Image (cartoon, rainbow, N blue to C red):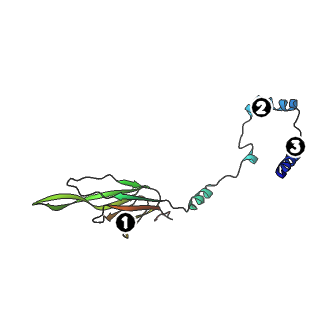
């Protein structure tokens, strides 16, 4: 009940505080000139007081440095299994880092015959982006098999682990300073 009394009091106070509207004829005279509304053009040179503060290029460059959140991606990747025919598996992309499987051949005994078998010998990590990245490749339950820092447009070749069917790849953006990165 007290809420309703307070609400009624507030509405009455607002109604008393608002000034009365202008006469309808005066308002019609002000708003009737459609040509005035059509001719009104906002020009930034003629109305500098209406513009806000302008950003300088130096301010924009400093703002990009302040972004300290590193993007992190993770994916489980299956290694290509041994085959009798040379197969070039397609590369896998994760946050502009390309993983290519470099295949090699070895001779294996199959009964009485020696057969050529292709297997994944190494992995090539290539950074195709504009930001330096850290790539961590690890196998489930083991320590990291590779921790690689890749500058812009660089690549690194790492030996593939033996007797492993898949590994986990993590890519983390690491902003660098200077040209050497």
Residue pointed to by mark 2: 36
Nearer to us in this view, 66 or 107: 107
View extreme (bottom): residue: 143
Rendered location of residue 96, percent (x, y): 43, 55
**Circle 3 is placed at which residue position?**
15
Residues 22 and 5: in front is: 5
Q: Name the residue under label 1.
A: 140
Spot occupied by residue 138 in the image (x, y as percentages of width and height): 37, 66
Quadrant location of residue 126? bottom left
Report the residue at 16% width, 62% height from top: 108
Q: What is the magenta range?
A: 81-87
Picture disc at residue 94: none
Alpha carbons under labels 1 and 3: distance apart: 72 Å
**Cα–Cα gap, marks 2 and 3:** 33 Å
CA gap between label 1 and label 2 equals 73 Å
Seen in the picture, residue 156 relative to 92 is either above or below; the reply is: below
Asked if residue 173 is among those painted magenta in the image, a careful observer would answer: no
Total marks in image:
3
Packing grade of label 2 (10 A; few <14, some 14-19, many >=20) is: few
The main secondary structure of the magenta stretch is loop
SS of the residue under disc 1: loop
């Amino acid at each position: 009940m007290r809420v309703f009394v307070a609400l009624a009091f507030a509405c009455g106070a607002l109604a008393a505080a608002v000034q009365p509207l202008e006469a309808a004829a005066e308002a019609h005279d002000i708003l009737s000139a459609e040509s005035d509304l059509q001719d009104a053009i906002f020009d930034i040179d003629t109305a500098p007081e209406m513009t806000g503060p302008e950003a300088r290029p130096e301010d924009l460059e400093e703002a990009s440095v302040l972004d300290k959140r590193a993007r992190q991606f993770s994916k489980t990747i299956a290694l290509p299994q041994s085959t009798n025919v040379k197969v070039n598996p397609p590369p896998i992309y994760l946050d502009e880092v390309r993983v290519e499987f470099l295949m090699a051949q070895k001779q294996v005994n199959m009964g009485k015959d020696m057969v050529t078998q292709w297997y994944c010998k190494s992995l090539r990590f290539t950074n195709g982006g504009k930001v330096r990245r850290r790539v961590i490749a690890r196998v489930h339950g083991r320590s990291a098999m590779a921790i690689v820092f890749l500058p812009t447009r660089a690549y690194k070749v790492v030996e593939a682990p033996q007797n492993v069917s898949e590994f986990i790849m993590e890519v983390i953006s690491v902003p660098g300073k200077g040209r050497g990165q």
